[in-house]
Amino acid sequence: MKAIVNVFLKNGVLDSQGKAVLHALSGHGFESVRDVRVGKQIIIELDESDSAAAKEKVAHMCEELLANTVIEDYEIEIIS
Amino acid sequence: MSAKIKVGIVQFPGTNCEYDTQHAFDALGCETVILWHKEDTIPDGTDLVVVAGGFSYGDYLRSGAIAKMSPIMKALKLYANNGGKVLGICNGFQVLTETGLLPGALKRNEGLHFISRHHHLKVISNDNTFLRHCEANEVVNIPIAHHDGNYYIDAQGLKELYANHQVLLQYTDEKGNIDNPNGSIDSIAGICNVNKNVFGLMPHPERAMESLLGSNDGRRMLEGFLSA
């Protein structure tokens, strides 16, 4: 089973990297770009058969290590 | 004669300021020992534990994030919760926020650059062990060297920091006017916990021990830990 974890800065926490990418894109003529956010994706292979149990385990990993919940939100997608 | 102050200095893979820190506390007459991160106890009689600067675990994932999983951190949490004094410098500050021993978090510098230079800091609260030899509003000159020094805390948390005198230092110019190098909220460079036994700052007082090398203002800061 595979888990895909996306980690992003929370809304309201300034994303300096997103801003830099936004400026670069706007400066290169991509005028329709309104906002950019940069996050990270963590792909985890697990020996689990139950996707609900897997999701719970990965959520625990996010709370313990993968995200800093003071400044970051996370989303988990389980692919069996 | 009173016994020597015992200082333990935590070393993770990627820590690189542990020997500067050791040199600084040795110069102040302390008994120092390097504590490898696989240790699961803090030696008896330790008066201060310093989490030194560097790039623990290559700053992979987030600065200080993987370090918080090391065995010594469990022992350090226990030590701090029993009132033991802890100082986190630079990456050590990041480790302490990741561990939850200090509130808030350290984000990528707003300008995205790694910044390495001397910077002026204003002392905000000195009613604590660390800065008791400094005057309030005094401006000190201390080197900074970091990529992720952009301190963040939510509005409520910030209010509490001020109310409890937990804001220790702000980045300023030499006159004490705000000069924010990295986007930190309120230009904050260092804080302590509510009980005032855990301290964290991004600047490096251990690199400001000799005026010949640019500044000895760090000496007065670290001397705060010398005797009760």
Image (spheres, rainbow, N blue to C red):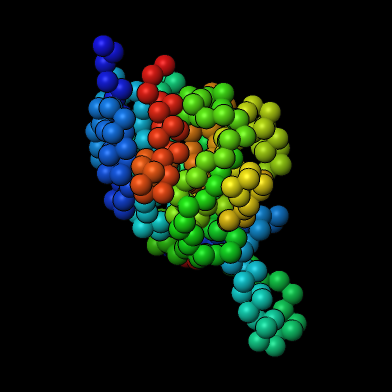
Q: Can you say whether B162 is above or below B182 in the image?
A: above
Left or right of residue B107: residue B34: left
In-image side of A54 versus B138 (left or right) = left
Q: Quadrant of the N terminus of chain A?
A: bottom left
Evaluate whether residue B94 shows in this view. Answer: no
In depth, the one of A46 and B11 nearer the eye is B11
Whether residue B146 sits left or right of residue A22 in the image: it is: left
Extreme residue in the top direction = B1
Residue B120 position, x and y percent, is: 55, 47
Residue B224 quadrant: top left
The structure residue drawn at horizontal position 66% and vertical position 76%, both measured from the top left corner, is A23
Residue under the image location 55 percent in, 65 percent down: B112
Q: Is residue B27 visible to us here? A: yes
Frontmost residue, A69 versus A60: A69
Image coords of residue A17 (percent x, y): 59, 67
Relative to B133, is B122 above or below?
A: below
Q: Nearer the viewer, residue B153 or B69?
A: B153
Q: B66 and B163: which one is in front?
A: B163
